[in-house]
Amino acid sequence: MTLYVDGDAFPNLLKPILLRSIERLGLQTFVIANKKINIGESKFVTYLIVEQGADEADHKIVEMANEGDLVITADIPLADRVIAKNAHAIDHRGELYSVDNIKQYLAMRNLMESIRESGENTRGPKPFSQKDAHEFANQLNAFLTKWLKD
């Protein structure tokens, strides 16, 4: 399994959590973004900077990801694309996206986008918290424990 991190907007609270897992398990990891993102130094982490532009990092992740790989992203359309390749996706708040739930998340995202485009003022996501970081750590650990033992 290879781990891919969508580096755009990756929360600082998650960097040490993720790095500990990478080091403990020796996970080959790619952090992909359109600017320099640093989650920490590790022989298992490769940083890739893609060209500027909307979704360039997403395109690179989809291009590189294979069946069984894990992508960490808060980008629901990206999660949908990697799940279509039989890879896995977890968001920054610990939500594990799957074939069973990704279309529902995508529909809700698209609905909210339509509402905003019509001029309605909607609240964005709540601020990222320590509780969210804890949920992410728990989900990541549970996922890696399950998938790496096979």
Image: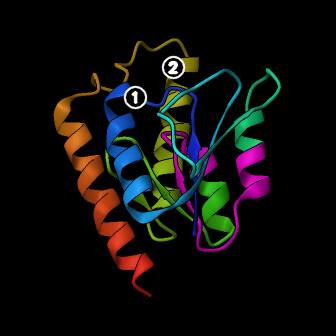
Q: Is 14 or 42 nearer to us in this picture?
A: 42
Quadrant of residue 96 in the image?
bottom left
For the N terminus, give its image quadrant: bottom right
Which disc, if any, is residue 11?
1
Q: Where is residue 51 in the image (x, y as percent from the top left)?
A: 83, 25
- Quarter assignment of residue 24: bottom left
Looking at the picture, does residue 23 appear above or below residue 50? below
Give the residue furthest to the front.
43
| N-terminal label among 2 and 1 | 1
Extreme residue toward the bottom, this view? 150
Foreground: 84 or 110? 84
Q: Is 116 situated left or right of 16 in this image?
A: right
Residue 34 is labelled as: none
Q: Residues within 10 Å of mark 1 (few under 14, many from 20)?
A: some
Identity of the residue drawn at 64% across and 22% down: 36
Local secondary structure at mark 1: loop
Separation of disc 2 and disc 1 at Cα?
24 Å
| Residue sitting at x 39%, y 35% | 15
Which amino acid does the dot numbered 1 rest on? Pro
Q: Residue 84, position in %: x, y?
A: 67, 66
Amino acid tagged 2: Arg
Pointer 2 residue: 116
Where 48 sits versus 52, above or below?
Answer: below
Nearer to us in this view, 121 or 93: 93
- Magenta segment boundaries in residue numbering: 60-79
129 on left or right of 60:
left
Nearer mark to the viewer, of 2 and 1 = 1
Does the magenta portion include 70? yes
Callouts 2 and 1 close, C-beta under 8 Å: no
